[in-house]
Amino acid sequence: MGALLAAGAGVWAAAGDGGEPPTAAPGDARAGTHTDPLPTGPTGRTGTTTGGTGTTSGRRGGERAPGDARRPGEAEVLFREPAPGAPENGADIPGFWVRDGHVVKAVRDKVIAYGDHGERKWTVTLRGAVCAAPESPTGGKVVIAYGGPGKDECGRLALIDLDHGAKLWDRRAPAARAPGADHLGMGLAQSGDLAGLSWYGGSAVIAVGDGRRVPAGALPRGCRVDGFAGGRSLLRAYSCDDDTAGLQRLDTATGQVSWTYPVREGYKVSNIYSTDPVVVSLADDHHRSGGIVALSDRGKRRSTLDLGERSYQPECGQDLFGTRMGGCRGAAASPDTFYLPTELSPDGGRGPTNEIHAFDLRTGQRKWASKVPGRMLLPLSVRGEDLIAYEQPTEKAAGSVVGVGADGGRPKTLLRLPKATRAAEVGLASASRIYRKGVFYIASDRLAGSGPDQAMIMAFRP
């Protein structure tokens, strides 16, 4: 589900992008309790552990078949991990991290590491399905939330060592405010020694080291936390009973407030696109846009982006309770530039096309626009002065990883994905996409079916 920012009309609206269907609320782990066994390697071993390490041998057998059909100029398929069976209404499977020599994926009640060729290295098994996970670990360790006791579908937390396959601690999430309430719509962000949790009706800051609650800096009187975003810093958005709102940066060692930015009257933070540099979007209670604002390292307004009359469509997912502030993909930032995709529009009969616009964070003005006729582009990351973007597949062509130079212009292809995996690529519309050291990973955020064209993870290299 993408988020459409109609700059001229000033309206946020839900806009489908072929991603996750609206069958389960964010954090809904009921679907994740389905007990179909996960597929095993050729030996049939799963390597399951409960906090320790485990290994398996053997590759995914026939899963390398797409690489056999490789055409000149196409990327090699390092591995393709098939999607396990999903319940009738599907299941969210948040959590994907790339490490040196392996990747780690949360899959329902398991956290699994896969080697460079898809071989399973270790598995940590939990007592419930993973319902929330941050994108950024701390020193190779990540806090995840999973199904708790009774009907609380996101009421337990665990710290996973992503490099060694160990569960370092496991405890209940801080209590919800109301007696008998659960942790509905859990959002989870991590930075340094802290993790911020927000759910419908409650929030908490915990220490990564032991999972215990940390007394974070106070909010203004009559205010409540809307959500957190992590990564290089930990940001906390809040709104108040008197219709004021703001954004705070927390010291990631102590939890104390480093600075507070008061949002202009009538609006609150709706999404946090970047925590360093800080770039956020604003909206009112009727979901009308208040624009996009860049802040300095001291929490002062740096610029307001001049969006003009164009409409923009980053991938912000489905967030019914507004607790996942840092959940947007398809946007990227460098210290002085912010990259945002426009919505799709016709392009002279060549098919739906969008553009990537680069904005100068010092002035808010647009620097350049880049497009490929007939294709949709999504920013991924910044490498040096170049933007790395994903050129989505079409009905006939596979996707590509492309680069755009500091001065814009037509994107240059860095990695052309194989036509043999195009159908599986299309099926990964709701996914994490990471380009690292020349390797491109796509990992699904949701299980919606199984079959020959259903993949959970795919990895490509030149």
Image (tube, grey):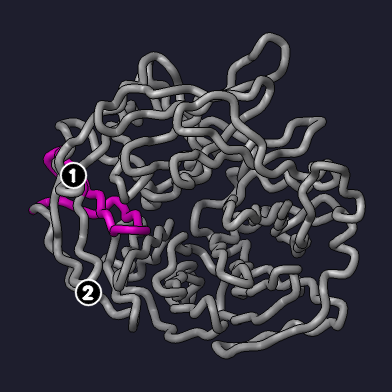
Left/right placement of residue 304 relative to residue 359 reads left
Residue 152 seen by the camera: no
Q: Position of residue 282 (x, y in %)?
A: 29, 34
Label 2 residue SS: loop
Q: Mark 1 points at which residue?
A: 246
Label 1 residue SS: strand
Task: Residue at 39% x, 64% y: name it.
Answer: 183
Distance (Cα) linking label 2 and label 1: 21 Å
The picture quadrant where one finds residue 289 is top left
Q: Which of 229 and 354 is in front in this view?
A: 354
**Quarter of the figure that contains the N terminus:** top right
Task: Residue at 61% x, 40% y: name it.
Answer: 390
User: From what the image shows, is residue 451 above or below residue 388?
Assistant: below
Residue 281 seen by the camera: yes
Task: Residue at 27% x, 68% y: name it.
Answer: 205
At label 1, which amino acid type do we have? Gly
User: From what the image shows, is residue 78 above or below residue 17?
Assistant: below
Q: What stretch is highlighted in magenta?
A: 221-247
Task: Residue at 45% x, 33% y: name it.
Answer: 406
Q: Does the magenta stretch include residue 245?
A: yes
